[in-house]
Image (cartoon, grey):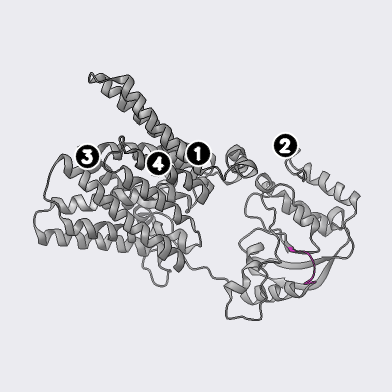
């Protein structure tokens, strides 16, 4: 968390300030004014650093904040002349757009939506020149060359996403794969998800900043371009899967810039220095309350998501409480036991995917409990599991495993019908049929939280070919609408 904050978080905050200053310069070029330079520096730093949604995914362990840096760099490059950047800047923007999906594949939504919206904006600009009596054909050629340069640079950087990797990123049916995770369908669902995550305070600040930017001739095109792109991204992503806290980094850079711009413009509009300072203190207090509502533990923060509808409406429903569990002694005992069972065997398979028990619980046990040096490092022993039918397919690692950890009751994090790769093997192991043939349950049991009992099974003899075929048939039959979904993949 500290490394991500230093490497990515601090540069993001500084880049937000740089973009706001760039937009201020663009606005001043069309309408000169006396700018409050001190507030122009301080306000964006404070507004962005105290937005809890910037840090919440970092606290949760996500690294995706890195994608905000290329997005903010694109904002900076386009802040002054959004539709007429130099060829050098267009080339740089293309490189940044191509870099985004390499960082995390879902950042491709930003790249694709920008190219589409930008192409329409360039065409509209050429058409407006025609309406003013300019040369439509020459304008279209020059803007087309600009778009081709930008798109070409994007494609060149995306070259690593070719072959099997590109097929998984671009050609896979992500709507089908992500269907188990979708819970916010339609435009209303997307808007509700946005509001419940950010809350009214942050969205209102971004809306005020958007109004200010649209009113100023120097920033109007920039604001309209990226506001339309943000709406397109929100709807397109939500049509594929529901936004998680890390996915909101697609929209967060624009919200940070607009909210910071709103604060700067409000402070500039106040004539009295004393009144300006009072306004800043009030805004700072609201930001601190918002920050505490999301990020402080219940014991330290006055506000949490459980304090009522008014708090949720203002600050959103997201609240971070440090992870805690009362069964750490049993987790440690299970990790020690797994580490002692056939250490020379192939990787251990954890047949569970809930927060109570999943492969990461054992894989990271030593890292999570550094004060317990007796816990073995299992990072190389725990196999990568198949958990979600549509996403992961046939559990080849399970068939090959010689040590299997099971849980009773079955531990799934989605509807059991979407996780038959966990439910069916558990049933077969309990019955001693198909994949359960040749497995022996060791006598030790481990009682985890929520009444979950974990056990360890070892394979005493190789899985027979006929038992494997029977297991494959049983698993494939769980999805008659797509019978090849859980069939073994060709090597």
- 266 relative position to 59: left or right: left
In three-dimensional space, the C-alpha distance between marks 4 and 3, rounded to whole angstroms, equals: 23 Å
Q: What residue is disc 1 on? A: 155
Of 150 and 127, nearer the camera is 150
Q: What residue is disc 4 on? A: 91
Q: What residue is disc 2 on? A: 482
Who comes first in sequence, dot 1 or dot 2?
A: 1
Who comes first in sequence, dot 3 or dot 1?
A: 1
Residue 452, percent across and down?
Answer: 68, 66
Q: Do callouts 2 and 4 mark residues in contact (Cβ within 8 Å)? A: no
Q: Residues within 10 Å of mark 3 (few under 14, many from 20)?
A: many
Disc 3 secondary structure class: helix
- 318 relative position to 269: left or right: right
Residue 314, percent across and down?
Answer: 34, 54
Who comes first in sequence, dot 2 or dot 4?
A: 4
Rendered image quadrant of residue 54: bottom left
Residue under the point 26% across and 23% down: 129
Q: For the residues carrying marks 4 and 3, which lies nearer the camera in this image?
A: 4
Disc 2 secondary structure class: loop
Of 136 and 2, nearer the camera is 136
Who comes first in sequence, dot 1 or dot 4?
A: 4
Whether residue 189 is visible to the viewer of this picture, yes or no, is no
Q: For the residues carrying marks 2 and 4, which lies nearer the camera in this image?
A: 4
Q: What residue is disc 3 on? A: 218
Q: For the residues carrying marks 1 and 2, which lies nearer the camera in this image?
A: 1
Residue 337, percent across and down?
Answer: 74, 75
Residue range highlighted in magenta: 342-348
Residue under the point 75% across and 39% down: 484
Above or below, 339 relative to 253: below
From this viewpoint, which residue is outermost toward the front? 88
């Amino acid at each position: 968390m500290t490394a991500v904050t230093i490497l990515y978080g601090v540069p993001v905050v500084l880049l937000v300030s740089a973009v706001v200053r760039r937009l201020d310069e663009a606005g001043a070029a069309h309408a000169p004014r006396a700018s409050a330079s001190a507030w122009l520096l301080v306000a964006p730093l404070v507004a962005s650093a105290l937005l809890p949604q910037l840090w919440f995914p970092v606290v949760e362990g996500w690294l995706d904040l890195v994608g905000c840096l290329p997005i903010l760099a694109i904002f900076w490059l386009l802040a002054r002349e959004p539709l007429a950047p130099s060829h050098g800047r267009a080339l740089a923007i293309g490189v940044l757009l191509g870099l985004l999906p390499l960082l995390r594949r879902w950042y491709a939504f930003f790249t694709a939506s920008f190219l589409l919206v930008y192409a329409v904006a360039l065409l509209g600009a050429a058409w407006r020149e025609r309406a003013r009596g300019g040369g439509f054909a020459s304008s279209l050629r020059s803007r087309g060359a600009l778009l081709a340069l930008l798109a070409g640079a994007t494609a060149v950087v995306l070259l690593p996403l070719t072959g099997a990797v590109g097929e998984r990123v671009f050609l896979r049916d992500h709507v089908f794969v992500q269907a188990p995770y979708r819970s916010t369908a339609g435009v209303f669902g997307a808007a509700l998800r946005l509001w419940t995550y950010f809350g009214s305070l942050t969205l209102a600040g971004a809306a005020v900043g958007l109004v200010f930017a649209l009113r100023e001739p120097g920033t109007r095109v920039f604001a309209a371009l990226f506001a339309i792109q943000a709406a397109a991204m929100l709807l397109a992503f939500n049509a594929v899967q529901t936004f998680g806290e890390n996915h909101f980094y697609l929209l967060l850079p624009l919200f940070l810039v607009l909210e910071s711009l709103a604060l700067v413009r409000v402070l500039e509009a106040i004539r009295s220095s004393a009144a300006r300072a009072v306004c800043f203190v009030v805004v700072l207090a609201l930001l601190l309350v918002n920050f505490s509502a999301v990020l402080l533990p219940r014991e330290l923060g006055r506000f949490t998501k459980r304090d009522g509808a008014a708090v949720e409406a203002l600050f959103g429903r997201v609240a971070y409480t440090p992870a805690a569990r009362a069964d750490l002694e049993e987790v440690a005992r299970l990790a020690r036991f797994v580490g002692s069972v056939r250490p020379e065997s192939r990787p251990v398979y954890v047949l569970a995917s809930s927060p109570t028990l999943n492969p990461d619980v054992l894989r990271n046990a030593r890292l999570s409990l550094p004060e317990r040096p007796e816990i073995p490092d299992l990072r190389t022993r725990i196999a990568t599991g198949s958990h979600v039918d549509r996403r992961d397919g046939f559990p080849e690692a399970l068939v090959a495993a010689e040590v299997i950890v099971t849980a009773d009751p079955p531990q799934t994090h989605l509807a059991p019908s979407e996780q038959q790769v966990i439910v069916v093997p558990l049933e077969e192991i309990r019955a001693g049929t198909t994949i359960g043939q040749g497995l022996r349950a060791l006598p030790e049991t481990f009682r985890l939280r929520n009444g979950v009992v974990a056990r360890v099974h070892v394979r005493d003899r190789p899985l027979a070919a006929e038992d494997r075929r029977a297991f494959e048939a049983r698993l494939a039959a769980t999805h008659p609408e797509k019978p090849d979904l859980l069939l073994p993949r060709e090597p």
